[in-house]
Structures are given as structure tokens and as C-alpha cells.
Amino acid sequence: MSEATNIPYVETELYRIRHSAAHVMAEAVLEFFPEAKLAIGPPIEDGFYYDFDLGRDENGKLITFAPEDLERIEAKMKQLLKQNAKFEQSSKTVAEAQTFFAGQPYKLELIEELAAGKVDENGNPLSEPVQDVGIYQHRNFVDLCRGPHVAFHQTGQAQCCQALAYQWCLLAR
Ligand SMILES: [Zn+2]
């Protein structure tokens, strides 16, 4: 990485690669945990993450990823990245998005905040309410997003193995 450039991080290719990789991580997680609830997954200073809520077990304990889950998620990401896919951009009205993401409570919260002009898909402050929300889809995985992404095959440049999956409920809110 060059320190000499003054390009803001969010405009760098590295940011887009990490951002794109978060989509693929979420896709991989849903393969093993189809009931997972997705929160947000922005790039961060030294990588990227995606918040997942895996629910609770029969004893009411929060389900978390085991080390072997992270291994199989990473393996799945690598496998998915070998299949070339395309990030397709579209948009939905707030009402359409609420219907589409009805099973995803954290996405519904984000849609509400977008519609109220509070924060964007990555949790950053917004200047005004949105009328339409950005949608990106690759294969069957659809997410709230404004992009931008890299070409799908480039996403593999992200260090998937360093991806951390946090438990939404453990984050201070
Ligand atoms: Zn995206």
C-alpha cells in the first residue's frame, strides 16, 4: 500500500475490494446459517467485517461462530469467488425494500434510518432522507448497498481469512 497518495480510503480500490468481500462473506455465512440476521458490513481501517446475529440456542445462549465455522466460511468464500459472478446494481423504494427485507430486522432498522435521513448503509451520517435505497445483488444474495464494488473476480484479493465475524448483540449500541 502506498502512503504517498492522498486518495481518501473510501475512494481506494482496497476499500472497494474489502467492501465487495463483505458481500461474499455474507453470502457464504447464509449457506451455513440460513437463518442468520444480517446487520452491517463495512470496510474498516485494516479490513472489513459483517455483523451477524445467529440467534440463540435452546438454552437461550447467543449462538456464536466456532473456529471451524470461520474455516468453512472462508473455504466457501474461496469457492464462491472462483465462480465468476457480477454485482448487479438496482434500487427499491423504501416500501419495496421493507417488504423484501421483512425477514431481516437489522436491515429494516437500516431502511428506517435511511428513510429518516439518519445514517447510511454503512452507519455513516446522512445529509437527507432517501427516497430509494440502493440494492446490490450477486447470484441470489441481495443486500442493501450503495456500492461501489470491484469486479467480482478481484474480490478474492481481500484477505478473507482475516475477516472477523462479530456478534451483533455483543456490540455496544
Ligand atoms: Zn456493497
Image (spheres, rainbow, N blue to C red):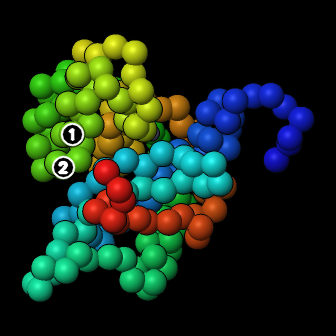
The structure residue drawn at horizontal position 44% and vertical position 32%, both measured from the top left corner, is 124
Q: CA distance from mark 1 to mark 2?
A: 9 Å
Q: Secondary structure at mark 1?
A: helix
Using residue 127 as the reference point, say whether residue 108 is left or right of it. Answer: left
Q: Which residue is mark 2?
A: 104
Residue 34 visible? The answer is no
Q: Nearer the viewer, residue 6 or 21?
A: 6
Using residue 64 as the reference point, say whether residue 45 is left or right of it. Answer: right
Q: Residues within 10 Å of mark 2 (few under 14, many from 20)?
A: some
The structure residue drawn at horizontal position 57% and vertical position 48%, both measured from the top left corner, is 44
The structure residue drawn at horizontal position 67% and vertical position 44%, both measured from the top left corner, is 14
Residue 101 visible? The answer is yes
Q: Which residue is mark 1?
A: 109
The structure residue drawn at horizontal position 26% and vertical position 30%, both measured from the top left corner, is 113
Amino acid identity at mark 1: Glu
Q: Nearer the viewer, residue 84 or 151?
A: 151
Q: Tell me the tag on residue 2.
A: none
Ligand 1 within 8 Å of the CB at mark 2: no
Q: Residues within 10 Å of mark 1 (few under 14, many from 20)?
A: few
Spot occupied by residue 144 in the image (x, y as percentages of width and height): 32, 37
Q: Earlier in the sequence, mark 1 or mark 2?
A: 2
Examine the image and state in which quarter residue 161 appears: bottom right
Spot occupied by residue 52 in the image (x, y as percentages of width and height): 32, 61
Please determine whether, in this image, residue 64 is positioned above or below residue 101: below
Q: Are marks 1 and 2 in contact (CB under 8 Å)?
A: no
Residue at the front extreme, as displayed? 172
Examine the image and state in which quarter residue 37 appears: bottom left
Amino acid identity at mark 2: Gln
Please determine whether, in this image, residue 80 is positioned above or below residue 16: below
